[in-house]
Amino acid sequence: MLSMATDYSPNIHRFESMADMRAGIGNPKPFLKAIADAGFSHVHWCHHWSGDFVYGESEMLYIGRLLEEYNLIVADLHGSEGREKFWYSPQEYARQAGVELVKNRIDFCARFGGDAVVMHAYPMKAESEWDSLRRTLDDLMPYALDRGVKIAVENLIDFRGVRFDNMPIETCDDNWPLIHRIFDHYPAEFVGLCYDSGHANLGRDRSAGLVPFLDRLLVLHLHGNDGTNDQHRNMFVNDLDWENLAKMIAQSAYTKPISLEVMVSELDENEDAFLATAFETGNRFSAMVEAYRN
């Protein structure tokens, strides 16, 4: 069994911008059909991961029909941090709207049998940011616990520095200290980790940050890059230490299908070949994990 992110972005030409492509907008039917045809059994729901989109009842009914038609299972979901409805905004009205946006994703996840909603929390610049995040997590905890869905905080670097200050990527802070702080304050029944192998390779090897949190690993975003930017390449294309990562996952609490967050690009021959490679490399890595478990 393997899981694939739904926004792997086929037919790139139909998107007006890279931001739209990465956000996985539009009708998910062609994405889901291609994922199923390639042999995947599960999906990491990654549509609308960036923005203020709220799923309505008609959309959830439609998605449910598609999942049934293509015999796909939702393993977990990438929540949206929100652009205006930012989930820990310093502006209280926007923070509250962000909480409602996350609740919408929790409802989606619970409805389709997933167990975790992935959220972004960036390295903190001020204690006031932590105060806002704490209020949000406090608001979400009873709602999430009641629905059996956890929040999975994703390891990130501070992309803001790369984008706006021309900061060398290797000097950018990562959010491992923040994740440690969150886990100190909230129970494993509510908050765990989403490990992104690509983010852990940006500028330098940051994978050692995973080691203290193996018992709270909930979601995997597996993909590769050359260290210069977040390329979402298929596994084994670049020189990440996949062997060591397989060992760590084998020792962790993670029990779901291996999950890929890869993206087709102009470097790939075509969509079908890209998905075939994703399926083959995903199965290869899954076998490595199972070998270490045994």
Image: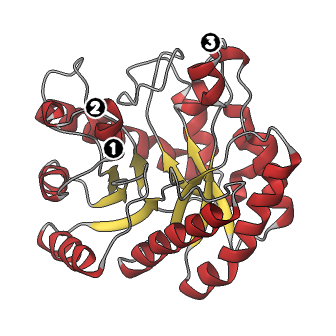
2 and 1 marks in contact (CB < 8 Å): no
Front residue of 264/85: it is: 85
Please name the residue that numbered disc 1 is placed on: 283
Rounded to the nearest angstrom, the CA distance separating label 2 from label 1 is 32 Å
Under mark 2, the amino acid is Ser
Residue 166, numbered circle: 3
What is the image's colouring?
Answer: secondary structure
Q: Position of residue 279 (x, y in %)?
A: 26, 42
Q: Quadrant of residue 45?
A: bottom left
Residue 17, numbered circle: 2
Could you tell which of marks 3 and 1 lies nearer the N-terminus? 3
> Residue sitting at 58 percent across and 45 percent down?
195
- How many other residues sit within 10 Å of disc 3, few (<14), some (14-19) or many (≥20)? few
Under mark 3, the amino acid is Asn
Element class at badge 2: loop
Residue 119, numbered circle: none
- How many other residues sit within 10 Å of disc 2, few (<14), some (14-19) or many (≥20)? few
3 and 1 marks in contact (CB < 8 Å): no
Element class at badge 1: helix
- How many other residues sit within 10 Å of disc 1, few (<14), some (14-19) or many (≥20)? some
Q: Position of residue 222 (x, y in %)?
A: 46, 40
Element class at badge 3: loop
Rounded to the nearest angstrom, the CA distance separating label 3 from label 1 is 38 Å
Q: Position of residue 217 (x, y in %)?
A: 63, 56
Front residue of 142/81: it is: 81
Rounded to the nearest angstrom, the CA distance separating label 2 from label 3 is 22 Å
Could you tell which of marks 2 and 1 lies nearer the N-terminus? 2
